[in-house]
Image (spheres, rainbow, N blue to C red):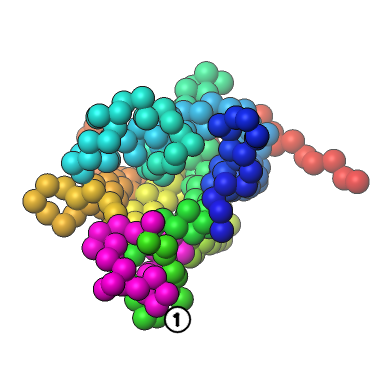
Amino acid sequence: MDPIIFTIPGTNFSLHWYGVIMAVGIVLAGMIAEWGVRQRGDDGELIWELLIWGVPFGIVGARLWYVLNDILGGGRYYLDNPIKIINLPEGGLHFYGAVLFGALGAYLYVKRRKLDFRLFLDAAAPALLIGQALVRPANWINQELYGPPTDLPWGIAIDAAHRIAPWTDTFLYPVDSTRFHPAFAYEMLWNFLAAGILLWIALEYKEKIKPASIFAGWLILEGFGREIIEFFRPDQPRFPGTDISYSRIVAGVMILVGLCWLLIKYEVIKVPFLAAGPDKYKLSRPAKKRKKG
């Protein structure tokens, strides 16, 4: 399947499936987050204002993280061609950068409006997982995010032009018969499962769960899933002298932060300089009711 939907004649502008699918994923994630805000008693429409801040920050962060990841892994492409850093159409975004910078943009909006950031973190947690999952089919179109060769029935074919070493040798790994682990699909399935777990907890224990606990759960589940998926991602730059990717290091930190967050929040452990915080959200105003008809 061609990654490009169409190109405007006489120009260099092309519409890519990745961009379209990502836009759809952002909108659907926004709808889920809006529902999450309403479930917590606040105005769900605030999510769309927040996205105006969060999405541009997220795109910049996703690109910068990807570039930095490549450079740390020993790549020289962006060092030798720095102008390529802003060439988004050629591809190269990283989810962690999108979340980190997107959260920064969202925080600036929340502080400006004097809202409760914890509420939006909890509402966004399952939405992030579902939005990320919805974008993964674009990786199949681009023939990326695949793992080692496999004989499993769900293995996918990868063209010679999109292969990475050591599978570029089509004599040893024939194009017609070699199939690869669809790592993007594994991550997609895990994200849907993790989102379901968080949504179930949020609804089942709505009156008992403390603010920011769902987001802490996201840190743990997202990190755990990425630790597993990274075993199927030979394309990821490794920390020098090890077989551990930078993404796995970040994922491990996320798990530890999420666990400590929950332990402190529920006062299982006490840290002098980290307070558990209020047990209720600070609402901006009552959630608006949708009109019938």
- Give the x, y percent position of residue 125: 49, 47
The secondary structure that dominates the magenta segment is loop
Q: Which residue is mark 1?
A: 153
- Residue at x-position 66% and y-position 29%: 285
Disc 1 residue type? Pro
Q: Up-down: is 105 above or below 201? A: above
Q: Residue furthest right?
A: 293
- Give the x, y percent position of residue 79: 24, 29
Residue 165 colored magenta?
yes
- Give the x, y percent position of residue 288: 74, 36
Q: Up-down: is 230 above or below 261? A: below
- Seen from the viewer's position, the closer of residues 169 and 256 is 169
Q: Up-down: is 137 above or below 107? A: below
Q: Quadrant of residue 34?
A: top right
Q: Is residue 289 visible?
A: yes
- Residue at x-position 19% and y-position 50%: 238
Q: Residue furthest top?
A: 112
Query: How busy is the neighbourhood of tag 1: few (under 14 within 10 Å), some, or many (20 plus)?
Result: few
Residue 166 colored magenta?
yes
- Seen from the viewer's position, the closer of residues 165 and 132 is 165
- Residue at x-position 57% and y-position 46%: 4
Q: Is residue 207 visible?
A: no
Residue stretch in magenta: 161-186
